[in-house]
Each structure stands twice: as C-alpha cells, then as structure tokens.
Amino acid sequence: MKRFGLILALMLSFSACSSVSTEREDTFSEQSNVRETAAQETAQSQPVSSVLESDGILTVNYIDVGQGDSILITTPDDVNMLIDAGEGPGKSGAVISYLVQNGVDEIDTVIATHPHSDHISAMDEVLNSTDVSHFYMPDVTHTTDDFENMLDALEDVPDVRPVKSGYDFNVGEYVSCKVLAPSSDSYEDLNNYSVAVKLTYGDTDFIFTGDAEDISEEEMLASGEDLSGDVLKCGHHGSSSSTTPAFVEAVDPEYAVISCGKNNSYGHPDSQTLATLNSYGVTVLRTDEQGTITLESDGEKVIYSGALPVTTEESTVQTTVQRYSSAVQPSLQETTVSSDVQSETSYIGNKNSKKFHKTDCGTLPAEKNRVYFSSRDEAIQQGYSPCKNCDP
C-alpha cells in the first residue's frame, strides 16, 4: 500500500499497480493531501530564527562521487541535509563511505533532484542506513532499477512528496530553503525536472541546481525570484547545456562548484562553461581536480580553506590555453598589465560582476574584464561592491 501511495503521490501509473481499486486510490489521495497540508502549515508556522547561532558554522560538502552529484549539508545546529546520492557500491559507493566516516546516521531532509542514476543510484542505501524525516523529489518517474529501489526504500520515511518552484522549507532553526525549480509540469529532457534550491543562512546563500539545463534556468530567471548566491553548484556537471551567461550574471557567485569525474567520457566541464564563469570572475572549484570540496559559512561570508586555482598573471595565458576554447582566449597583449598601472593599483574591479578585489585575491577576473582603482572610495563611488572572499 505504501509503495503504491508513493507512486500515486507522484502522479505516476505503473502497470503493476493497475489492479488497485478506485476506492483505495481515493483513500490514499485523501490521506496524502491531509499530510501534505499539515506539513506545509507546520513549516510556515516555524520561521527560521533571525538571530544567528553564536559561532555557528554551516558546512557544505560537495562529495567527490566521480561522475555524479552528492552534497551533504550540516547546519549550525547539527541538522543534516543531503542532495542526491551519486552511484551505488557497485560503482563508487562514495556517499555511503562518506556518511559512515563522518558518523552521519540521521538526515532531516533528503532531495533526489531527478531520477538519473548518477544522482540516485545509492539513494536506497542511504535511506536504508540512516533515519530520514523528509524526502523531496520532482513529479517524474524513470523506468530503472535505481528508481524502483529508491521507492522501495522510502517506505519508512514519514514525509515523502513531489515539490516544484514555490515550495519553502526549513532545515533546523537557522537555515531556510526555497525551491526554485522545476516550474513546468512536463519537460522533454529529464534533466529539466531537476529540483533546484536556494539555501540561506544569515547573509549567505547557496544555489543547488541538480542537472537543470538552459530551459529550467530561463524559467528561474523569468520567475522574478532573487537568484543571487555566494555559491553556485553548476548544473549538469558543467555541461554546455547549463550555466548560461544570463544565469551566472543573476546568481553573481563568488564560487562555482562543478561535480564531475576525472577524465570523464562526456568532456565535462565544457570549455565554454568555464569561459563564462571566468568572464564573470568566479572562482571555479571542481571535484575532478580537488576531490571533495568543503565550504563553510558563518552567516556573513563563505569560507573556502582549500587550495584556490592559480590566477597569477604568469599563469593566465597557460590556464586559458588549457581550459578555454580559442574563441575566448585572451591575447598575450590583453593579459599583460604595464608596471605603471600595477604600481598605482590598490584594488581590481570586475566589469561584469561589479565587485572589487584586493590585488592578491584568489577570485580575480580575467584581464579583459578588469578595471583598476587607486582607492577603495574610488571603487565604491563607481558602483562597485567589495568581494566577499578577500574583503577589501
């Protein structure tokens, strides 16, 4: 009965369930509506605390699962949230190993962004090995064993529901989440069903997009929602189908995280995606290069303590040749700054993001997108805001 209910709640119709009577369907539908209404009212009646926890740190771990996605979030009051679960033990099993190593046996909220195996293959094992309170997914199915196994494992989860844009929920006392996508009822590509979420802690925001592609990004842009965020988890592993210039400009992140496998056969991340991020002065962090990536927020700024990508003048040309297509490669002349300009420069601005940085900041833009200021006041007077990473 519970398994049928899960499918019905997602408005699905597997042939195996065709013999269930209309009376049973109506009974479950009524119960499901009551449960969803009560849960929604509870969430709305418990707003996130406007006071940050003293010395509280939000931790976001982008787990290296190879060619897939999995993100573990721990709030300042030690409440866990998991977005996607990568592959299973027959492939990488990285998620289960990570949870065990970090002693995670309770997860308040789990999101399966969409039913592709590189996002849900290990989800049944996560559900079977941890206590999960809330489970969110899009209103779509997939005819795979991974999806079937996930449904079976959901039987003991008290709150299972399909979500779309406009749904809000809290994780613990200090963190709020807003579902940004999907917006439409149907898409041709399963990737565009991806549940995209904006997570807010204090003055910091994280954007998670699953495999959302340009169609979904356009819908998010058209929604009128505030998409700005300190960190963007790039859609579809940095594929050319996602992370459009308009979306990057709207989010205006300090960091972009790309989860993909080392030397993967898909060519992820795409060179044009990297070029777009580079043009906006975004620091790109990649699991295929840096392994599991951990970002922290104290409610005022996002902190990354790992090694930043090299952005020195001497390496600009070499990095550009390695990562970006010839169509966007700056010339040697463009990447050279005269000694006179360097000696007079106190701060460097990004023409696209309208942020200004210290000269040794790890998130400096490409040379063609730089503007130089001799003082902090000059940068602010010209409409530039301070970079949150280097805090000029």
Image (cartoon, rainbow, N blue to C red):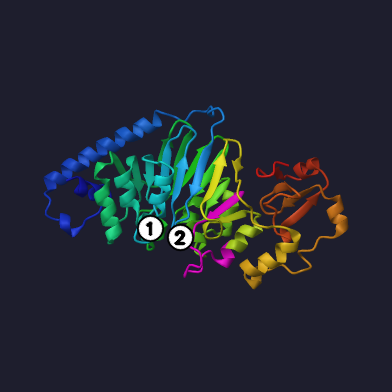
Q: Is residue 1 left or right of residue 177?
A: left
- What residue did someone put label 1 on? 87
- What residue did someone put label 2 on? 66
Q: Position of residue 105 (x, y in %)?
A: 36, 40
Q: Position of residue 363 (x, y in %)?
A: 67, 52
Which amino acid type corresponds to the residue marked 1 in the rendered image? Glu
- Determine if the magenta segment contains residue 370: no
Q: Position of residue 29 (x, y in %)?
A: 21, 42
Residue at 57% x, 53% y: name it. 256
Which amino acid type corresponds to the residue marked 2 in the rendered image? Gly
- Mark 2 nearby-residue class (10 Å; few <14, some 14–19, many ≥20): many
Which residue of the protein is positioned furthest toward the right in this rendering?
340
How far is mark 2 from mark 1, CA to CA? Answer: 8 Å
| Labelled disc at residue 309 | none
Q: Which residues are magenta?
A: 253-273
Q: Main secondary structure of the magenta part?
A: loop
In this view of the protein, which residue sits in the foreground, 121 or 188?
121
**Of callouts 2 and 1, which one flags the residue occurring earlier in the amino acid sequence?**
2
Residue 244 against residue 175 in the figure, above or below: below
